[in-house]
Amino acid sequence: MNREEAKKIHKHLLDAAAAFRRAEAAIVDVGDDGRKLFAEPLVTAVFHLRFKLLRLIYKRFPDLEPPPPPATIHSTLRWEDVSLPASVLETDVDRIIFSVMKTRWQKVAMVLYRAIEKVEEGELAAPVDYDVFAARIQALAEADLLDAQGDLQVWDRSEVRLKDRSVN
């Protein structure tokens, strides 16, 4: 395959990726039965398209790979600026954060998602949003209670994990 052939295939694969995104949106509208029917095969197809087919082209022709989108700061809220509801304590927020943390690296976005799931399940006396949890994670990392890498204000490009207490 030469570069011109790769460019042509690349264009068709990107068109297919756009079609898959439209299909995903349509599947959301068909209800639970449709989602159950289509979810797994569509996820498999998207995986193969993005991580197999496109990777083959990018490996051979790296200049065809688009640059990553620019990093987006999701929150600049600092813990010292947080005002918790009267029925929620700092220790309540910490308990939820530590309950969803692992010893392996996880994207901050995933930790926040899991923390909010716990809030929605009623594990706090009052609602607390993503920004508050993110500010607390940053404070815990700054206090050396969590390991962190990346800019914690950019949730999808930073990671956290539980401290390894065996290395003291």
Image: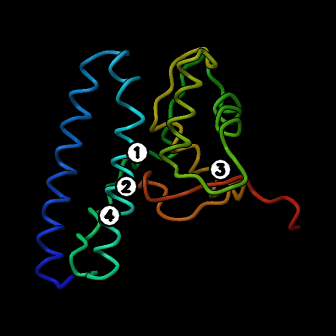
Residue 133, located in which quarter of the rendered image? top right
Residue that badge 2 annotates:
48
- Spatial CA distance of label 1 from label 3 is 37 Å
x, y percent for residue 111: 56, 42
**Contact (CB < 8 A) between labels 2 and 4?**
yes
Q: Nearer the viewer, residue 10 or 95?
A: 10
Name the amino acid, label 4: Leu
Residue 5, located in which quarter of the rendered image? bottom left
Badge 3 crowding class, 10 Å Cα cut-off, few under 14, some 14 to 19, many 20 or more, is some
The reply, left or right, for residue 58 in relation to residue 165 is left
- Spatial CA distance of label 1 from label 2 is 6 Å
Residue that badge 1 annotates:
44
Name the amino acid, label 3: Leu
Name the amino acid, label 2: His
Q: Which residue is drawn at the image coordinates 71% and 33% (left, top)?
A: 95
Residue that badge 3 annotates:
140
Residue that badge 4 annotates:
53
Name the amino acid, label 1: Thr
Q: Quadrant of the N terminus?
A: bottom left
x, y percent for residue 166: 88, 62
x, y percent for residue 92: 68, 28
